Amino acid sequence: MSLLLATVLTFISSNAQSNEPFKWGTATASYQVEGAVNRDGRLPCIWDVFCADSNKVYMNESGAVADDDYDRFLEDIELMKSLNLTNYRLSFAWPRILPDGVTPNQEGIAHYQKVITALLQNNIQPFVTLYHWDLPQAVYEATNGGWINESIVDYYVQYVDTVFTYFAPSVKKWLTFNEPWTFCVQGYDDNGGHAPGRCSDRSQCPQGNSSTEPYLCTHNVLLSHAAAVKLFREKQYDKKYNSEIGITLNVDWAEPASSSDADFNASQRKLIWQLAWYADPIWFGDYPQIMKDYIGDRLPTFTNQQKQDLKGSHDFFGLNHYTTAWVQDDQGAANASVPDWNTDQRTNVNAYNQYNGTVIGAPCDSPWLFVVPWGIYNMVKYVDNRYNHPPIYITENGVDVINESSIPLPEVLNDTFRINFYDGYISNVLKAKSEGVDVRGYFAWSLMDNFEWADGYSKRFGIHYVDYNNNLTRYRKASANWFSNITQNNPMGDYQVHLRLAS
């Protein structure tokens, strides 16, 4: 490519960015913060059952009470307002809105109407996730396994149609799914560590097939996503209300463990298996060819009509990113006795370098999380290049501080580790933005400490501390003050402004 052409392309990319203010905000999810699982017509979801029956959740904790946001949402909106935050990513609970998968629950709908109204009255724009893992147990049972059965698509469409009917005029940004990789791989493989807790290992899971079910889950999620976007556009919600819809995908940056071609190719496979598995069908209409080659007939296929419905079913790219790992080629994994998502990609992934033991970054409280700020820069660049410069929203990014749950008040509120994490990651996001990547927003995970799925309440990601032993009292951490200063004084998400503020 000539220097002139490269300059022109950079100019075009830079000027394609939105002139609207950068969307700074925080994020939560219904099951992680709401509680009130037996109130106002809500019926159980798969996580209620998993927490009660699986013995795989820390201390057998659950989201039964969580942060009691169901009753305290006005208080939590005040937390955001006091920080001058103007965007909030939340999710609606399917088991509140269609508890049995069929019948709308007016009490559940009325609750979210109150939440959305309160947000808008406080000049906070809702960014709504339609599915953040709390599948109604009734739908799981009716479909004989949930996302592994294509019959779930009709249930999902009925749910989102109900939501759109009531909320399309007031919500401008929609996400069909949050992190389908997580609930498809960890819910249907990886020893069934997340709901619904299925896998091939009968010492870990009473049922499931790790070789096929993660791929079936993903396939039906993609069909559901395409159907939801098609409905959204056919009813012209985008045009009537100037709103947009997309999906949020999670991915770790994959750094080659050495300079060899084999390890570089392995790192690319890791990105394909975690991200392109979902994004390629949505942007291009089909799975990556290398996945077809490696997985064979265990990978479902799309009809021509399904490909057409999938291709272009996006208005933006939602990205959840936390960490980075070293990736080494491992062709021997192809001979696994029980092939699954992990072995199919033929990689060895580790935070400690496979050749010299170098750790990829500073460890955090969660064993999977290491601080690697440059990873998010590489990640948004990858998305920008592979998917033709889409608008990107960082819909989750955050960290848990080592032993934070053991640090007493008020010392725990001085979370400089988290401040340094946010500074490094946000700086790299805005650096990529300054170079022409169309990043339009950043949502910190999370507004407050909450139920962290299989980790229960043992891990804390919030910029507000929740005292689980004292009436769920919220306390502002130092990171909340820092984040508020950054967002108030850098409304356009400018890289140079951030550097000045951070210094």
Image (cartoon, helix red, strand yellow):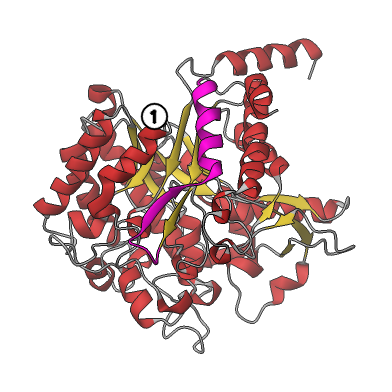
197 relative position to 265: left or right: left
Q: Report whether residue 330 is seen.
A: yes
Image coordinates of residue 103 in percent, x first then y, are: 11, 58
Label 1: which secondary element: loop
Residue type at numbered disc 1: Thr
* Residue segment shown in magenta: 468-491
For label 1, the residue is 86
Q: Look at 64% across and 46% down and name the residue there.
A: 416
- In the picture, residue 65 is in which quadrant? bottom left
In the rendered structure, the answer to whether residue 402 lies left or right of residue 63 reads right
Q: In front: 120, or 54?
A: 120
Is residue 482 shown left or right of residue 428?
left
- Residue 303, image x, y percentages: 40, 50
In front of the other: 151 or 237: 237
Q: Quadrant of the C terminus?
A: top right
Q: Position of residue 340 (x, y in %)?
A: 58, 71
Instruction: Give coordinates of residue 446: x percent, y percent.
Output: 47, 48
Location of residue 99 by image quarter: bottom left
| Residue neighbourhood size for the residue with mark 1, other residues' Cα within 10 Å, grouped as few (<14), some (14–19), many (≥20) | many
**Residue toward you, 395 or 259:** 395
Q: Which residue is located at x 24 percent, y 47 percent? A: 160
Whether 16 is drawn above or below 443: the answer is above
